[in-house]
Amino acid sequence: MESLDNAGVYQLRKDLAIIQTVDFFTPIVDDPYTFGQIAAANALSDVYTMGGTPVTALNLVSFPTKKLDISVLKEIMRGGVDKMREAGVILMGGHSIDDPELKYGLSVIGTVHPARLITNGGARAGDKLVLTKPLGTGIISTAIKAGAADTALIKKVSESMATLNKKASAIMQEVGVHACTDITGFGFLGHTSQMAKNSGVSLNIKAVTVPYFAEAAKFAKQDFCPGGLYRNRDFYKDVVKIGDAVPEYLQDIFYDPQTSGGLFISVSPRKAKKLLDNLHEAGVAAAAIVGDVTGEPKGIITVI
């Protein structure tokens, strides 16, 4: 709990531990089936982040029965189940309540060998930093809610958010990495700050190498920024040092709260190219080396 890691881990025996996590949220796209897929992928991500294999899940549902037809809920759950099947996860049941605001997500249990557990606190000086998905989903989701995003963009961003981190996780485990987190509600700079603090290191980010949706830049300039972006900036600004050359819209994207974002991985420099090549070969096209790790000053993120 103290390290704000991605999930809870409980060791059952010398060769087996369980990973437990939960996540749910309100719709970020209009299509219920797509929302179900995104919510499920987002909840499963915490297990992948820690090098585990998700095994079972429980549905969590808040549904306004007086406002929406039950067919909407069926489509949401169909999307979630299809994504769980893709992940090889068994749905064990769940719980639902009548609520004025629609919410959906999962409680997930996964497994991991204790010796192969990956946390957000193992980054080492000299490591390279890899990000596997583009940023900007929070800003674009805000634009979607305002009716400013076209169909093609909604489809592109939805596909990114609905993509499991399963493949990227398997590759990082095969290569061998020092630390990992996923980029979600605290934004890119929030989650990188947690890794720096828990690892006792400093992270240097090269802004021009960080992948993001080009449309997010356009919408950031038009102030389609979610409230969570400003809260992230206020909370983490004291440990983040941003160079004058980094434009304001890009700073917004770096603080933008993400939904079902990519993995952020700290890997030794001798393995970094292999990791990146394997990710690209497996179809994780956006993956990029975005910075490196230094020993001092501890807990600080520098963006240039």
Image: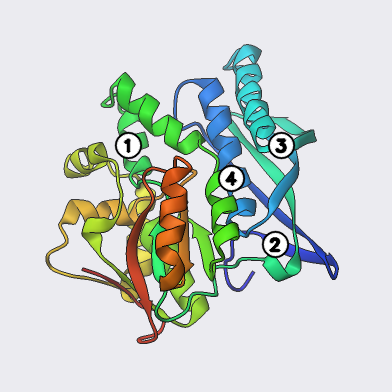
Q: Position of residue 6 (x, y in %)?
A: 59, 60
Q: CA distance from mark 1 to mark 2?
A: 30 Å
Q: Position of residue 213 (x, y in %)?
A: 29, 41
Q: Is residue 272 above or below residue 91?
A: below
- Identify the residue at image location x=59%, y=34%: 103
Q: Is residue 168 left or right of residue 133?
A: right
Residue 262 can be seen in this image = no
Report the quarter where the N terminus lies.
bottom right
Residue type, label 2: Gly
- Image mark for residue 166: 4
Q: CA distance from mark 3 to mark 1?
A: 30 Å
- Image mark for residue 8: 2
Residue type, label 4: Lys
Q: Nearer the viewer, mark 4 or mark 1?
A: 4
First in sequence, mark 4 or 3: give its number.
Answer: 3
Q: Nearer the viewer, mark 4 or mark 2?
A: 4
- Identify the residue at image location x=66%, y=18%: 74
Residue identifier under label 3: 88
Q: Residues within 10 Å of mark 3 (few under 14, many from 20)?
A: few
Q: Residues within 10 Å of mark 2 (few under 14, many from 20)?
A: some
Say what secondary structure mark 1 lies in. helix
Q: Nearer the viewer, mark 2 or mark 3?
A: 3
Determine which quarter of the picture holds residue 99.
top right
Residue identifier under label 1: 140
